[in-house]
Each structure stands twice: as structure tokens, then as C-alpha cells.
Amino acid sequence: SPELRTRTFVDGTWHEGSPALIGPKSHAMWLGSTVFDGARWFDGVAPDLDRHSQRVNRSAEALGLKPTVAAEEIEALAREGLNGFSGETAVYIRPMYWAEGGGYMGVPADPETTRFCLCLYETPMIEPAGFSITVSPFRRPTPETMPTLAKAGCLYPNNGRAIMEAKKRGFDNALVLDMIGNVAETGTSNIFFVKDGVVYTPVPNGCFLNGITRQRVIGLLREAGREVVEKSLSVADFMDADEIFSTGNHSKVVPVQRIEGREMQPGPVYREAREAYMAFAKKAG
Ligand code: PMP
């Protein structure tokens, strides 16, 4: 297979590959002050790139960092960088901010030392046909305990251990609950189910990411006349579903094929959601 290419924009120039950017004294390295976002370019389109560019700046602000690059500029940089790719593979678009210094042993990040990079890297065009989920013993933190609405690196080790535990049990991903015990999201995506033709998804309560793909899919389904209900949902609600699917920038809309011991098939509403998303993506460019 051809080698997958990476390009990184940092300090005003494009670099081939993935340059080393932080050292042992970087605040980001020892205290985790990083935020990022992810959009994906495939078949010549990068849907909702503007929203992903806006969100990384909001994430930076949520951590007390200084977003130094305007969202429109991030979008323009991404489009400039994408010109260097063949289009034969998908390209992941990852803008990031981090704090370089916090002063001598300083716990608070010094916002004046915020740095930015934009990494574009080819990923195989493979789309998962579906995945399995098990209820995670690890939960989402509350907004009072962590910057839950930011796409911050510091939140992801918790998602990571939820997924590691799921894999140990023989599942692909975890269904993660919030502190009250309602379903929040998976380790990597937002989650929906279908019952009697109605689509249900957890109502954003500050404990999980209100994903850009989630909002897009809800809008498209409603435009198509489908009822979508956002409310607090339990594991039992999901166990009783006709269909379950997830949304996220990487794989867009993907069906769940097993929840705990229960096998399920990709259903008609999943296909409707995926087709509506792909049609939108084509038009959006
Ligand atoms: N939740 C988590 C934990 C995620 O990592 C992602 C992927 N960014 C999502 C939800 C979906 O968000 P989006 O649709 O904005 O990619």
C-alpha cells in the first residue's frame, strides 16, 4: 500500500511529516494543556470544516488558552494544505493548541505561551461496517470536575480506559454513562437509537460532547420529516431499541451490531441517516 502522508503547519510554515514540537518542560507535556479538533476530508469534501475550526477556538478558551488563529484562517489553512494531497485517501484535519510554558513549576497554563499547529494526515478510506458496545464501568466527568465541553486532550485518557476495558471484554467500544447513570456517548462518538420509527439521543447536559456530526444528523433527519427526541436515556432504553447508531467526524454514521449480549442488524433509519449525511457532504464541499 502507498505510504500515508502527513503535513504539519506550525510557526508560519508547512512541514512534511510530523515535527517534534514539545519538550519535557512544555506545560502541555507534563500537565496536559492541549485542545484539538478533527474534521475529515474524503472524496474532495470536508463537511462542517468551519464548525470544527470554530470549536477548536472555543475549546482553547475553555482551558484558559489563547486561540491565536481565527477560525476562518484555520479553515483557509486546511484548504491550502489539502491541495498537497492526491485525494486517493481520506485526510484527517487536526488543528491543535497547547501551552508551551507555565512559568517555574506553574500549574496554571500561561495563555501568552499558547501555540498552534495544524496537522493533516492521510488515513485509509476504510469505513467500519458496524461495531459492538458494552456498558463502561467508567463514567463521564461533570462540567464542574472537568472542561467537558472542550475537545481537550486531558479528557481522553478516561475515554481510552473505557475502550480498553471494552476490548478486554471482546467489544469494540464502550457505552459511557454520565454521573447520574444516564447514557452519555461512546468512547469516540455520539449515540442514537430508534424505536418504532422515532429517533432518540441523549439530551446534552454538559457531560458529553454535543458533536458537530450529531447536530448535523439531527437537523437532516428532522428536515426529512423524521421525529428526533433529545432526552435523558437509560441503558434499558438502548437494550430495547430497534436500531442503534453512532455519529462522529471520522466515520460519520455507523451502526451498532451488538450491545452486550444482543445482536442487531443495521436498520432502515441508520441507512436514511447515513445517506442524508453523505448527500449533505457532497453538496457542502
Ligand atoms: N464524543 C467523543 C468523545 C468524540 O471523541 C467525538 C469525536 N470528535 C464525538 C463525540 C463526535 O463529535 P463530532 O461529531 O463533533 O466529531
Image: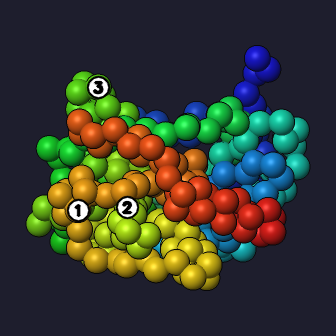
Task: Write down the residue under mark 3.
Answer: 170
**Label located before the other in sequence (2 or 1):** 2
Tell me which residue sits at (35%, 66%) in the image.
Answer: 195
| Callout 2 crowding tier (Cα within 10 Å): few <14, some 14–19, many ≥20 | many
Q: Position of residue 249 (x, y in %)?
A: 57, 55
Q: For residue 237, which numbered disc appears in the image?
A: 1
Q: Is residue 126 visible?
A: yes
Q: Residue furthest top?
A: 1
At numbered mark 3, what does the secondary structure look like: helix, strand or loop? loop
Q: Are marks 2 and 1 in contact (CB under 8 Å)?
A: yes
At numbered mark 1, what does the secondary structure look like: helix, strand or loop? helix
Q: Nearer the viewer, residue 101 or 73?
A: 73
Q: For residue 45, which numbered disc appears in the image?
A: none
Mark 3–mark 1 distance (CA, rounded to whole Å): 22 Å
Q: Is residue 69 above or below residue 9?
A: below
Q: Amino acid at mark 2?
A: Phe
Task: Write down the residue under mark 2.
Answer: 193
Q: Amino acid at mark 1?
A: Asp
Give the left or right position of residue 27, taking residue 205 as reference: right
In which quadrant of the rendered image does the N terminus lie?
Answer: top right
**Label located before the other in sequence (3 or 1):** 3
| Callout 1 crowding tier (Cα within 10 Å): few <14, some 14–19, many ≥20 | some
